[in-house]
Amino acid sequence: MIVVYGAGGIGCYVGGRLAAGGAPVTFVGRQRMADEVAEHGLRLTDYLGADLRVDPVRFETTPAAAAEADLVLVTVKSAATAGAADELAEILRPGAVVVSFQNGVRNGEVLRSRLTEQVVVTGMVPFNVLNRGAGVFHQGTEGALDIQRDAAMTPYLDAFERAGLPLTQHDDILPVQWSKLLLNLNNPINALSNLPLRDELSQRDYRRCLAAAQAEALELLHAVGIRPAQLLAVPMHRFPAVLRLPDFLFRRLASKVLAVDPLARTSMWEDLEAGRPTEIDYLNGEVVRLASSLGRGAPVNSRLADLIREAGTDRRAWSGPELWHTLRLAM
């Protein structure tokens, strides 16, 4: 049995695709989501035109539902990882396989430190999922699931293949995680813009903000000897230069770099809209922590983190020129 633990947007989409492919899946999440899925079932769509339905859905709200799991996909927000690990440690059988499909770069370590009798595998979800309400979850950007290579995952490879979510295995997952984090540095920019991803990225000033945040992070990663993996057609160390291009040139390259459909939004935008805590401390905040460990600063990422914290109580839309001006003052 496969259990999705912390079934929000990513969890419902990945677990729903697995269930649609015939895998036995149990979802564990909040009562709000359980009620939504009970009423509507699950509908999974993507930017390529997929449209799948799963109904009925086994959705539970207590950790005990994971007790008999063979494979657990942890999809809670990063701030909840330690708590989820402690809950799972109480109920999982020894040898169960636990995969972290979460943002950030340290969740696998947190799980591994607490789940000492289980096999913990670090994974990464490169694509964006939008919760459209009424049980509909939409994959708005391209990408395949990535995981650390581990023999314990071999029995499950076919299930992911049937689901249309084949697993790309890596001997070293950390460079892949950092590449995803570099892309996720756009999350606060998108949330502050209050625009769909494609509309935001079509404006050069917003892209300049992202380029500055990425360039700052790349310099720090170079200092500690981490070379981010290439997830897109353009190597990550060249991506800031592409983002800075004039709009007409960027539009020519954009479709070759990353497929983004008109519905795509970031999870940080969703969290702010719903009044929930964001993952800013595990995205741009991770860059700030890395800088601090080197005795350096990360003013662009630090300022973006501050703006998101302020947006939790003072929500407004920032124009591209306004946000770019604010970040330049911090540099």
Image (tube, grey):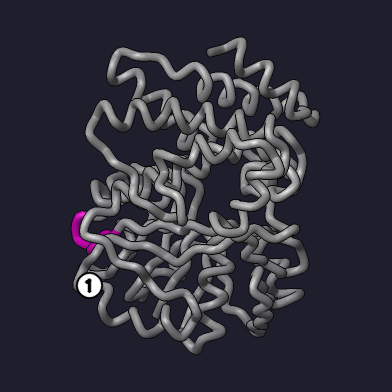
Q: Amino acid at mark 1?
A: Ala
Classify mark 1: residues with Cα within 10 Å, few (<14), some (14-19) or many (20+): some
The part of the image, by quadrant, that contains residue 313 is top right
Tell me: 131 left or right of 79: right
- Span of residues in magenta: 116-121
Which residue lies at the image location 71% right of the left edge and 69% below the top edge? 136
- Residue 268: x percent and y percent? 63, 42
Residue 108 in the image: above or below residue 134? above
**Residue 299 x/y as whole percent:** 50, 16
> Compared to 57, does 107 lie above or below?
above
Image quarter in which the N terminus is found: bottom left
Residue 92: image quadrant is bottom left
Q: Which residue is mark 1?
A: 152
Report if residue 8 is visible in the image.
no
- Is residue 24 shown left or right of residue 197? left
Magenta residue check for 18: no
Q: Residue at x 70, y 74 (%)?
A: 38
Q: Residue at x 46, y 29 (%)?
A: 285
> Residue drawn at (28%, 82%), measured in percent from left and top?
155
Q: Give left or right: position of 126 versus 170.
A: right
- Classify 315 as above or below 53: above
